[in-house]
Image: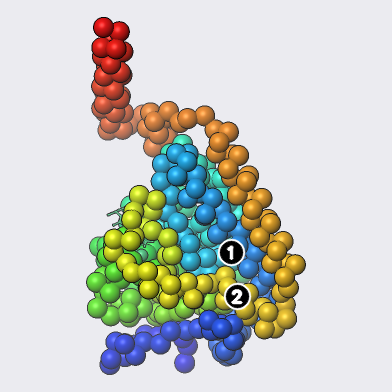
């Protein structure tokens, strides 16, 4: 029986969680998933370890840059590195990835340099990387909006004859990512309906990081999220999202099935965001230090290191080199941002549509009037001071 299930257990809590590397680094063999991992070498696994270290370093630096006033906001993916690096690498080059705003590991795996992400969070670009070239949609901040878009894109692929032909170079699937909270959005359900009806090549991937800002995932759903899509006839699996191999193998199988005309799949990856929701959130107000420390014990980077040590495929020198490279990346990001001029907030209105748009124009004028108030106030203050 495949790990992708179509039926719901009598007792919802009996939903299994697929795990290949236990928190102590022990590897569990698994016929179906091991076949999907057979082409990976120890060097690939070391590269994934390095990727996770690099993306964590960039993430920590971005948080500091926000604190230094260089970014407007930053949404940290601390703790979700395996859920993203594994999924990003499982996709083939031609697959189209449709992310949320927290997908820094996905971006890294697709070859998007982290400074592009910083530009987005500084408010100077909607997406300074090329979504077509890198086959990765711009970050989406409107919860759930990307789900029907991803399904629509997949329907387009079907109509273009790029699904189920057997050509491994051209057959294409779409991987769309969204959070546990976003699973409650109507658009997510609408996406499921179209995907199931038209059997689109879409893989829905939820990083259940346990929280939607301050709302726990247990409030979003009475049953494991993995069980939901089965009501639509979309096979699904719940996995340990802090286990890079479980992530890679299941995403790989799901995308293979979708690409070859087997229809949509859903994956719920259990993980944890170890930082606050964003730099403007105070997570100490709604979650306990105990919960955080439990999840720190399941750290995805430490787990892969333990596994690689157990099979004698990593040493201290390699790990130290990764740390150094992470430090160098942080320094590069620091210098990149500190070298930029202050953005002109009005510029953002020019980047919405290629051609003039009446509504955006009106909003721009409204914003200019708003800004002018402060100039008037500043002039008043100067006058007042001169008296
Ligand atoms: C349509 C919409 N409603 C509300 C928000 C405000 N908002 C931003 S992030 C967030 C929580 C999302 O939680 P989840 O989907 O679990 O993703 P996570 O942030 O945990 O990665 C909310 C409510 C939004 N961006 N878009
Ligand atoms: Mg969440």
Q: Nearer the viewer, residue 136 or 291?
A: 291
> Which residue: 37% across, 69% down?
289
Instruction: Tell me if I can see residue 1 in this picture.
Output: yes
Disc 2 designates what residue?
304
Taking the image as shown, residue 200 lies to the left or right of residue 37, namely left
Can you say whether 141 is above or below 68 in the image? Answer: below
- Which badge, 1 or 2, is on the more N-terminal residue? 1
Query: Ligand 1: does it lie within 8 Å of the C-beta at label 2?
Result: no
Local secondary structure at mark 2: helix
Local secondary structure at mark 1: helix
Q: Nearer the viewer, residue 155 or 31?
A: 31
Disc 1 designates what residue?
52
Q: Residue 18 at x, y = what percent?
A: 47, 84
- Work out which quarter of the rendered image holds the C terminus and state it: top left
Q: Residue 368 at x, y = what percent?
A: 30, 24
> Which residue: 73% across, 81% down?
312
Count of marks, rendered view = 2
- Specify the farthest residue to the right: 317
Q: Residues under labels 1 and 2: Cα distance?
A: 10 Å
Residues under numbered marks 1 and 2 in contact, where contact means CB atoms less than 8 Å apart = yes
- Which numbered tag is attached to residue 215? none
> Which residue: 53% across, 76% down?
243
């Amino acid at each position: 029986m495949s790990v992708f299930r179509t039926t719901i257990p009598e007792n919802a809590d009996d939903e299994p969680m697929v795990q290949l590397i236990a928190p102590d680094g022990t590897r569990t063999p698994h016929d179906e998933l091991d076949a999907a991992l057979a082409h990976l070498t120890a060097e690939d696994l070391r590269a994934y370890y390095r990727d996770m270290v690099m993306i964590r370093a960039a993430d920590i630096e971005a948080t500091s840059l926000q604190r230094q006033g260089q970014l407007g906001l930053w949404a940290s993916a601390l703790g979700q590195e395996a859920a993203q690096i594994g999924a990003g690498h499982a996709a083939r080059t031609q697959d189209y990835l449709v992310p949320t705003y927290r997908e820094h590991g996905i971006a890294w795996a697709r070859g998007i340099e982290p400074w592009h992400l910083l530009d987005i969070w500084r408010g100077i670009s909607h997406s300074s990387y090329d979504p077509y070239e890198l086959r990765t949609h711009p970050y989406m901040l409107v919860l759930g909006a990307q789900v029907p878009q991803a399904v629509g894109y997949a329907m387009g692929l079907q109509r273009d004859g790029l699904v189920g032909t057997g050509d491994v170079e051209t057959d294409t699937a779409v991987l769309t990512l969204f959070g546990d909270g976003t699973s409650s959005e109507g658009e997510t359900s609408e996406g499921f309906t179209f995907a199931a009806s038209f059997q689109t090549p879409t893989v829905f991937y939820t990083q259940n990081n346990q929280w939607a800002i301050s709302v726990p995932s247990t409030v979003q759903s009475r049953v494991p999220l993995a069980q939901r899509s089965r009501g639509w006839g979309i096979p699904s699996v719940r996995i340990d999202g802090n286990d890079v191999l479980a992530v890679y193998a299941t995403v790989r199988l799901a995308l293979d099935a979708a690409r070859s005309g087997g229809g949509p799949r859903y994956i719920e990856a259990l993980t944890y965001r170890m930082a606050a929701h964003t730099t403007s959130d105070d997570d100490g107000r709604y979650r306990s230090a105990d919960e955080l420390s439990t999840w720190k014990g399941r750290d995805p980077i430490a787990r892969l290191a333990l596994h690689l040590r157990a099979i004698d495929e990593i040493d201290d020198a390699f790990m130290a080199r990764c740390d150094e490279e992470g430090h160098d990346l942080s320094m590069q990001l620091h210098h990149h941002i500190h070298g930029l001029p202050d953005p002109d907030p009005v510029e953002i209105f020019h980047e919405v549509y290629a051609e003039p748009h009446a509504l955006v124009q009106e909003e721009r004028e409204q914003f200019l009037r708003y800004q002018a108030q402060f100039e008037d106030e500043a002039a008043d203050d100067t006058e007042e001071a001169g008296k």
